[in-house]
Image: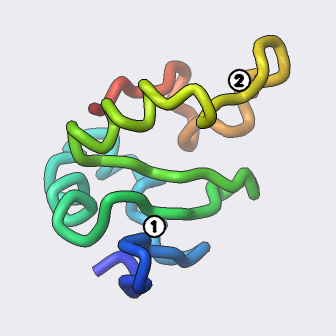
């Protein structure tokens, strides 16, 4: 399991998602993704480099988030840093 389910349908915990940042996850993300989808709509975590992020794994929830204009970083303020990429992975994986 990845964390504890809060009353609002969110799972939170900085160290609960270590499995997201491993070479094994990059090779085969499906078991971890299945667990994420079963547990909650959104998961809050912290990357190994300290960046806080939300993980949304269910298709309909992803569509909802992407369609919501209030969920965004203002244009030009987000910069993808190599330091936030997973342990030597040069390109962030497209995992929907």
Query: What is the C-alpha distance between the residues marked 1 and 2?
Result: 20 Å
Above or below 68: residue 47: below
Label 1 sits on a secondary structure element that is loop
Determine whether 65 is above or below 7 in the image. above
Q: Residue at x 63, y 61 (%)?
A: 46
Task: Determine the residue positioned at 60% across, 36% down.
Answer: 71
Count neighbours of disc 1 (C-alpha within 10 A) and say few if under 14, some if 14 to 19, many if 20 or more: many
78, 23: nearer the viewer: 78
- Residue contact between numbered discs 1 and 2, judged by CB atoms under 8 Å: no
Farthest top residue? Answer: 76
**Percent x, y for residue 48?**
65, 58
Specify the label residue 17 is tagged with.
Answer: 1
The quadrant the C terminus occupies is top left
Residue displayed at 49% across by 26% down? 92
Q: What kind of element bears circle 2?
A: loop
The colour scheme used to paint the residues is rainbow
- Left or right of residue 53, residue 62 in this image: left
Q: Residues within 10 Å of mark 2 (few under 14, many from 20)?
A: few
As displayed, is residue 61 above or below residue 40? above
Q: Residue furthest right?
A: 77
Instruction: Give coordinates of residue 3: x percent, y percent.
Output: 40, 81
Whole-percent x, y for residue 19 in the image: 39, 63
Q: To which quarter of the image does residue 42 belong?
A: bottom left
Residue topped by disc 2 = 80
Q: Nearer the viewer, residue 29 or 6?
A: 6
The earlier-in-sequence mark between 1 and 2 is: 1
Left or right of 3 in this view: 38: left
- Which image quadrant for residue 36? bottom left
Q: Residue at x 43, y 84 (%)?
A: 6
Does 70 sit left or right of 91 as displayed? right
Q: Please, is residue 91 above or below residue 58 in the view?
A: above
Residue 41 on image: x %, y %: 32, 59
């Amino acid at each position: 399991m990845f964390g504890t389910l809060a009353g609002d349908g969110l799972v939170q915990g900085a160290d609960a998602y270590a499995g997201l940042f491993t070479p094994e996850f990059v090779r085969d993300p499906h078991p971890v993704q299945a667990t994420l989808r079963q547990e909650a709509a959104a998961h809050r975590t912290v990357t190994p480099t300290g960046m806080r992020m939300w993980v949304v794994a269910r298709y309909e929830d992803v569509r909802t988030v992407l369609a919501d204009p209030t969920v965004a970083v203002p244009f030009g303020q987000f910069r993808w840093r190599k330091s936030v990429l997973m342990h030597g992975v040069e390109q962030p994986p497209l995992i929907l």
